[in-house]
Image (cartoon, coloured by chain):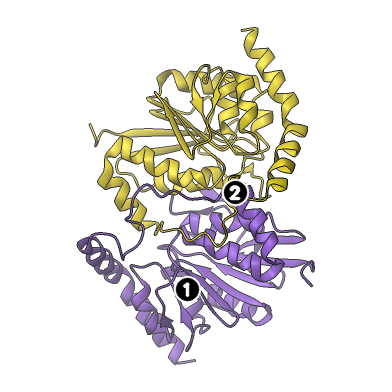
Chain colours: A yellow, B purple
Amino acid sequence: MLDAEITIVVALFPQLTQLDFTGPAQIFARMSNTRVVLAARTLDPVVTDCGWAIVPTATFDTAPPSDVLFVPGGAGAFDAMLDSDVLRFIRRQADAASFVTSVCTGSFVLGAAGLLKGKRATSHWASLHMLSELGAIPTSERVVRDGAVITGAGVSSGIDFALSLVENLRGREAAERIQLTIEYDPEPPFATGSPKNAPPDWITAGRRDAEATRLDPVRQAAAALSEK
Amino acid sequence: MLDAEITIVVALFPQLTQLDFTGPAQIFARMSNTRVVLAARTLDPVVTDCGWAIVPTATFDTAPPSDVLFVPGGAGAFDAMLDSDVLRFIRRQADAASFVTSVCTGSFVLGAAGLLKGKRATSHWASLHMLSELGAIPTSERVVRDGAVITGAGVSSGIDFALSLVENLRGREAAERIQLTIEYDPEPPFATGSPKNAPPDWITAGRRDAEATRLDPVRQAAAALSEK
């Protein structure tokens, strides 16, 4: 069972925050007997938030059914959340998957697809509180599991998320060995990586800015969801 | 001075370990007034160690002079290290740069270009000891600065490296703010991220495997360097 072939399907969309995806992707690539598929609307390179592009390996139509569906976040997640092609793809993949997962604001895409109703889930600290609009129970932890749904917090938490996923799929030693190969023994230079420790006015401003651009699309997605 | 435009040039080559690059790239992209250029031999997508590809934004010939030269590592670094086009590009860029930097085994490419002679530098734990072949002083720390040369240890250390680079270039508050936006408050699930804490037989095997494939090219690069 621990050695069965696993297919991980990643949903790519324009303006994703690339580290949401690339952190977990480094870990997925070091799992035994695992195929990672990068699915996007077309096979054209997908431009990330950093300005440069990643080449998909499948389209939403050609991607195989996944054992693990993974959705990264970023500003583009709030467009993806309103895109019926993306949501149809996410729902179809989620039906087959053993785990439905996200990092950062990727959880809003899961939420818009109706996959977080009544579920504990996390997201980037600046947007997390808005996740309740989509029926989720916002949970301020780095990695949150509620049944088959595993969500990671902001950006760099994808590394912690992916290692815990490997433990679930392949056992503890496999995860420990991958942690060594990526030399994941972090030494954050400052204490400001968490909203608990950063200056309160930075947090207030971050949440205000996130609401200014994101609350409208989130409510639009919530309205569309309640009509279904 | 802290606001002057900065150009960061990244050297891309096939089979780079993508997180060596994508971790720092997420942080570079959030620096003010900063242009990030991904330079490769051609503009064709560069296939990473994870099987999928990143699209360069310039060639070795068209990339502008850098303020910061950055070289990621990976299995491909040991081919890049023996590639005269890559080394010529690295040397030309290093001439103009204020900082010459690497993560993981990217330090071997810097070493092969003759940029680490007598310098303290780090690399991935499994290969670090071989860096002395290229005249460097192997230094087992997560981020090592020796004058204008800053090197990071294995893979995930690129995040720590890049935040410390931002502090050098833009001041402490800028780095602290970026650390918050990427929610870098790591919670490694296991203690095995460092060779200090992993089982000794994993470390012995990792170093042996690295030597088996890498010591020959490293010595070849060292020989080529001593003939210059």
Residue at horizontal 67 percent and vertical 23 percent from the top: A82
Q: Is residue A174 above or below residue B100?
A: above
Q: Is residue A186 above or below residue A67?
A: below
**Would you name the residue on which mark 2 appears?**
B182
Are the residues flagged by discs 1 and 2 from a single subunit?
Answer: yes
> What's under tag 1, amino acid-wise?
Ser
Return the residue nearer the eye: A72 or B47. A72
Residue A35 in the image, given as x and y percentages of width and height: 38, 38
Return the residue nearer the eye: A10 or A125. A125
Q: Which mark is residue B107?
A: 1
Residue B58 in the image, given as x and y percentages of width and height: 67, 61
Secondary structure of the residue carrying numbered label 2 = loop
Residue at horizontal 47 percent and vertical 82 percent from the top: B120
Which quadrant holds residue B130?
bottom left
- The C terminus of chain A - image quarter: top right
Residue at horizontal 32 percent and vertical 75 percent from the top: B215
Which quadrant holds residue B7?
bottom right
Residue A192 in the image, given as x and y percentages of width and height: 60, 53
Residue A96 in the image, given as x and y percentages of width and height: 40, 20
